[in-house]
Image (spheres, coloured by chain):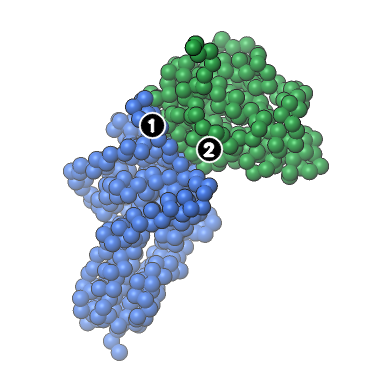
């Protein structure tokens, strides 16, 4: 099944009731699939007039407590930033998919990971975070959607699936597990008070500085809980590794091939693949690299996640970088050359 | 003692932040009277975006959402699509609805989104201190048109009801004013009709309310009402511009 379509099907199975989208390559299949399936599944699909309208429709639907989602690719996600900031500031859950393409500007339509900073640092103005998941296969994208909705509901915040054009467009075998999405009570939802309770207000405006500060600080307390309990990474052959490669998403699969090739020529290489980008798996990064002399960060960008790797390791060891950008996908042999260069046979 | 006059139930009993002489209060009141009369407070969700009415969530007793600037029709679309049986309304100013939110307004209308839009046109950005709005009349002095709006430089105002009346999805496009008792009664009737339309799933209903901004116009409240009558109504004629139900009159 194609990655984008699998994402859409998985979202419906995860209980997504409203999907609002806008066409942009390479994620348009998500909308097309939703258009076919959503009504039959008892949900709402609506093509919005813009990315801005789409994310605000998500805001409206999420305000009423239903699971709502939008998807886009890089330039479109930039347009959603305003709405995402409001959603975060209003403590609303939702899921946003970014099937990344090359940038900046209109960039290109080939796979990229150049929106790491945007996803983890800057999806809109103000002090806030969103959950960022970086699956590396079609199956993992399917499995992640339910988790993203559950976590978004639990912590009342947006969750993003940060995919890329490679994952969105590739076809892989996929199975849809039997899932029972977590039922979360949403007493805050604006569904009409039915003359049974005081009115609910969904709002991100606090004109008193101390009140606004308190709302932000309270939110950051929730973030601490997430950072302590929900950072995820997958480690591969890192225990005895002299050089640990780190990469996420589709790039991690390229890196894994390179690690296997390195092992075949006697280089003790390993791989740590962050699965959550926010929260960044700091503890796992420290643990996986504790015996390594060098860390090599590989990305489809000019080097963005490398900042978090260095922060996690507090610059305790050299962190080298290899990247391709603009839609160019790194090859395993290229990564192998880098492994040889930094961690190879002297 | 017989009660002869009281505050609508849907209107919260608190002080408002609106300036003295501002007609938002009248519009809030008649909107709440309609909600009371139709007994729909418990089934209503209001969406108020950025502008003077941004804090309207404190004044209306129904469930409320504060939306980003200009995005109320999109937010309301999300609410309504997820809850088709609820009453959903937006309450927007002219800068919000006809400048930064033009796309959201036009597309909600053309989709025939089954919502009510209360559009308060006072020809200026009130909240930020009186800058040129998309509805600022040619010659009107504002903070950003200190020599008067010059169409050669700043272009022309938008007549929203006339524009939206051209769209098939619009069920009701009516312009009213709150400068006099007869006009206020007419305004309330229009708002009632808009909500009845929503009940009957007739489509998108917009009621444009010509309103005053004494503070930013630099006029006393009574003079502000006079300006509404002498300058705004001639430029923005009152009337029904579209009525799909066929009951209205031009």
**Of residues B65 and A283, which is closer to you in this image?**
B65
Task: State the residue at coordinates (56%, 40%).
Answer: B50
- Compared to residue A78, the image places residue B166 above or below, namely above
Element type at mark 1 = loop
Is residue A279 at all visible to an observer of this figure? yes
Q: Position of residue B43 (x, y in %)?
A: 40, 24
Q: Position of residue B132 (x, y in %)?
A: 71, 40
Give me the C-alpha separation between circle 1 and circle 2. 17 Å
Task: State the residue at coordinates (48%, 53%).
Answer: A210
Task: State the residue at coordinates (50%, 46%).
Answer: A206
Give the residue number, with chain letter if any, for mark 1: A198
Labelled disc at residue B55: 2
Q: Position of residue A244 (x, y in %)?
A: 29, 75
Q: Quadrant of the C terminus of chain B?
A: top right
- Compared to residue A340, the image places residue A250 above or below, namely above
The chain displayed green equals: B
**Of residues A164 and A115, which is closer to you in this image?**
A115
**Of residues B160 and A41, which is closer to you in this image?**
B160
From this viewpoint, which residue is outermost toward the front? B1
Chain of the residue on which disc 1 is drawn: A
Q: Position of residue B204 (x, y in %)?
A: 51, 24
From this viewpoint, which residue is outermost toward the left? A178
Q: Colour of chain A?
A: blue
Left or right, A287 with reference to B68 = left
Callout 1 environment at 10 Å: few (<14), some (14 to 19), or many (20+)?
Answer: few
């Amino acid at each position: 099944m194609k990655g984008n379509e699998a994402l859409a099907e998985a979202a419906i199975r995860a209980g997504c009731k409203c999907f609002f989208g806008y066409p942009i390559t390479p994620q348009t299949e998500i909308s097309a699939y939703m258009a076919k399936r959503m009504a039959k599944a008892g949900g709402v699909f609506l093509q919005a007039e813009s990315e801005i309208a789409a994310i605000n429709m998500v805001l409206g639907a999420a305000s009423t407590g239903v699971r709502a989602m939008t998807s886009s690719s890089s330039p479109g996600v930039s347009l959603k930033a305003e709405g995402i900031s409001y959603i975060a500031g209003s403590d609303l859950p939702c899921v946003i998919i970014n099937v990344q393409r090359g940038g900046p500007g209109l960039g290109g339509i080939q796979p990229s990971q150049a929106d790491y900073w945007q996803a983890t640092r800057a999806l809109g103005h103000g002090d806030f975070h969103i959950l960022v998941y970086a699956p590396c296969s079609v199956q993992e994208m399917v499995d992640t959607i339910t988790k993203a909705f559950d976590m978004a509901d639990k912590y009342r915040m947006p969750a993003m699936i940060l995919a890329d054009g490679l994952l969105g467009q590739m076809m892989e075998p996929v199975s849809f597990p039997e899932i029972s999405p977590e039922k979360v009570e949403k007493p805050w939802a604006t569904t009409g008070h039915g003359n049974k309770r005081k009115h609910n207000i969904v709002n991100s405006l606090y004109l008193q500085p101390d009140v606004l500060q308190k709302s932000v600080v309270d939110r950051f307390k929730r973030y601490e809980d997430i950072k302590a309990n929900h950072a995820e990474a997958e480690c591969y052959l890192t225990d005895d590794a002299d050089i640990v490669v780190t990469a996420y998403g589709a790039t991690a699969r390229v890196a894994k091939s390179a690690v296997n090739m390195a092992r075949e020529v006697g280089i003790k290489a390993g791989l740590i693949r962050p699965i959550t980008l926010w929260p960044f798996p700091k503890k796992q990064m420290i643990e996986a690299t504790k015996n390594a002399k060098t860390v090599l960060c590989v990305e489809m960008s000019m080097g963005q996640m490398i900042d978090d790797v260095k922060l996690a390791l507090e610059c305790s060891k050299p962190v080298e970088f290899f990247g391709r950008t603009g839609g160019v996908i790194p090859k395993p042999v290229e990564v192998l050359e880098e492994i040889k260069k930094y961690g190879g046979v002297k | 003692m017989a009660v002869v006059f009281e505050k609508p139930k849907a209107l919260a009993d608190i002080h408002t932040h609106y300036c003295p002489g501002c007609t938002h209060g009248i519009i809030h009141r008649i909107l709440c009277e309609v909600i009371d009369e139709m007994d729909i407070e418990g089934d209503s969700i209001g969406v108020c975006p950025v502008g003077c009415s941004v804090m309207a969530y404190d004044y209306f007793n129904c469930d409320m959402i504060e939306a980003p600037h200009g995005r109320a029709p999109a937010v309301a679309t999300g609410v309504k699509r997820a809850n088709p049986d609820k009453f959903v309304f937006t309450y927007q100013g002219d800068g919000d609805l006809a400048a930064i939110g033009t796309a959201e307004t036009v597309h909600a209308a053309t989709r025939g989104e089954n919502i009510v839009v209360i559009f308060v046109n006072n020809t200026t950005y009130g909240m930020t201190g009186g800058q040129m709005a998309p509805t600022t009349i040619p010659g009107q002095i504002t903070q950003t048109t200190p020599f008067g709006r010059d169409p050669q430089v700043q272009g022309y105002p938008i007549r929203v009801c006339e524009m939206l009346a051209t769209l098939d999805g619009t069920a009701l496009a009516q312009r009213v004013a709150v400068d006099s008792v007869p006009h206020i009664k007419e305004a309330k009737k229009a708002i009632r009709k808009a909500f009845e339309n929503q009940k009957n799933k007739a489509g998108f209903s917009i009621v444009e309310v010509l309103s005053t901004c004494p503070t930013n116009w630099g006029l006393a409240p009574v003079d502000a009402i006079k300006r509404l009558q002498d300058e705004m109504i001639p430029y923005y004629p009152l009337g029904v511009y579209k009525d799909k139900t066929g009951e209205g009159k031009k």
